[in-house]
Image (cartoon, rainbow, N blue to C red):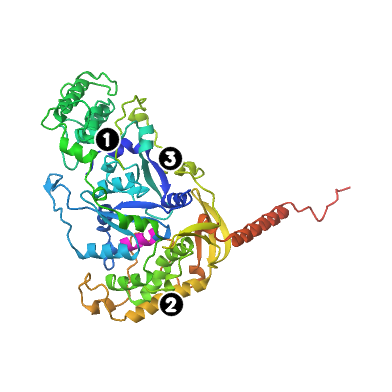
Amino acid sequence: MGIKDLWEVIEPSEKQYTLEEIASDRAQRSDKHQLRIAIDVALWTFQASSSKGGRSPELRLMFYRFCRLQELGIRAIFVFDGPGRPGWKRDREINTIPMDTEFRQALLTMIRLFDFHVWHAYGEAEAECAVLQRLDYVDLVMTGDVDVFLFGARRVVRQWPAKRYTTIPCYDMAWINQVIGLDRSDMILIALLRGSDYSHGSAQVGITIAEALARCKKHGRLMEYIQTNGDYGDYVKEEDLAEELRDALNYELKNGCSGYSNRTYSQTILDNDDFPDLQILRDFVNPKTKIQQKKSDDLAKWLERQSSPDWKELTVFCKEAFRWTTSYILRRFGSLVFPAYLTWRLRNPSVPSPTAQNSSKLTVTTTTQQISAPPPPSKRVKTTSSSSQQTQVDSFFSVTKLKNTTHQEVDNGKGKSKLNMNTDNMIVRITNEKWVKSQRMYYVEFDTNILTEFLDSLQSHLDQTGKELHFEHIFDKPRSVYLGNEDSDNDDDDVDTDVALNEKDPKKICRRWISADLVDPSYPRQVKEFKAQKAKREQMKAAKNNLPDIITIPDSP
């Protein structure tokens, strides 16, 4: 469901961060878990539908994004729309039963191979995402539907970054309340007045009028009644509260007593034919979700354990899905998947290399207290983040940071144990350092044997499978289709420009910019050596700039 122009209303509260900043900040906090995001699959599917070039461009775009999610250590929960959605949307009938297409089956399979989580909603995916966050299963919601706030989401990222280190729009209900002066219940009222995907709202009511009426805070009693399912104390009826709200807002439209509007609207009248739509109100305040109706043991266990992608089987999937040859798969996995594999190894030092293995109570804020009116829309200033201030990222989460240590608690399935993280000699040395936004990065040289081991294991697995089909139940095509020439298209969407697909030199592939947060606790010796060398270079540079004159030219007599 979408509310027209509501994004524009809350835009002044927007802040801009990179996904790298957010993921790094989350991983360094006291509870030490990686960033967890609930992703509305419908948004990604819509974006993928415009991909062009090559074979299976929609699925290929998803593959590239999944590689980036793994590289950033993000635990993604992909939320699919469920059959409980209303059957009428935007004035047309919709099919609420998911279509069992090849793309959908392939996407579900690829999500599981990357070891992300699949969650099928009861109805609207954005409602499920919001409740998953309200119950603290995830830190953020990624969706383009503004009504996710009306369902109760607190922190939202609106879109996927176009490139690495590109900032993306971030929203927090605390920021919206502070900058705009609106809370969740106010936005629900705006949706009832303005209309949404499932209702037309009131005639002649635009976003300006709807916002002004929401600021009057006349809707608290009705919202609380709906929230408590009628357990309101005194005997009152839902219809009476709806009429009370309607009369109060009509009086405000005619007289403009609150001062939130610069004019009166005596010709605009709210009547009981279109306002308020109590069924829509109930759906927003108390959305029906699967997470509230079903035990989530599988989700809880997935969140507690370490990520474990099936790197080997992914190669077979790519061979059948994208019709890549073995040599092309190794090239692409060396460029696109290997960075994710490296950071996965850094984050999970207790897990043996997979190349050596076989494959709460919900509330609606009615805000009865007085809130000082924010500046008018024309004078609002959009909040932007500073690259030198990590504190703004800190405010995106409600927990305290903890300094890095050289030990980490790891759940290996037999209980948590202390693990010395400096046991893996993956990193040979650190050669450079830089800041990207607020994130410190090291230029790291990895042991080239890591790449050799990784690619050799993948090739061995591909050789063993031979002509055997693992995913023929998804890709129902003749086998000969998958044995053609290498994919030659170079117009892949969502591939970063700094990724060299034809890179073959192991030394170059194994030199990468890595977040210092991943390196500092695990490789203190290499960090110490780098800092010592850096200090030595700076001393030599300073000495060179202060060399005394060797030859003194005497003054002329």
- Expressed as whole percent of the image width and height from the top left, the position of residue 449 reads 51, 74
Q: Nearer the viewer, residue 409 or 34?
A: 409
Instruction: State the separation of the CA atoms marked 3 and 2.
Output: 46 Å
Residue 106 to residue 531: above or below = below
> Which quadrant of the structure image shows residue 430?
bottom right
Establish if 374 lies above or below 101.
above
Q: Residue at x 25, y 31 (%)?
A: 224
Q: Label 3 belongs to which residue?
A: 384
Task: Confirm whether residue 160 shows in the render.
Answer: no
254 in relation to 422, above or below: above
What x and y, as percent, mark residue 554? 86, 50
Q: Where residue 530 appears, x then y in whole percent?
A: 62, 60
Q: Quadrant of residue 15?
A: top left
The answer to whether the residue labelled 1 contacts the one labelled 3, judged by CB atoms less than 8 Å apart, is no
Q: Main secondary structure of the magenta part?
A: helix
Say which amino acid is labelled 2.
Asp
Horizontal and vertical percent position of residue 247: 17, 23
Other-residue count near label 2 (Cα within 10 Å), few / some / many at <14 / 14–19 / ≥20? some
Residue designated by label 2: 456
Q: Which residue is mark 1?
A: 187
Q: Tell me the SS state at disc 3.
A: loop
Q: Which residues are magenta?
A: 62-69
Q: Inspect the magenta stretch and tell me whether residue 63 lies in it.
A: yes
Q: Residue at x 41, y 61 (%)?
A: 306
Kindly identify the amino acid type of the residue bearing the numbered disc 1: Met
N-terminal of the two: label 1 or label 3?
1
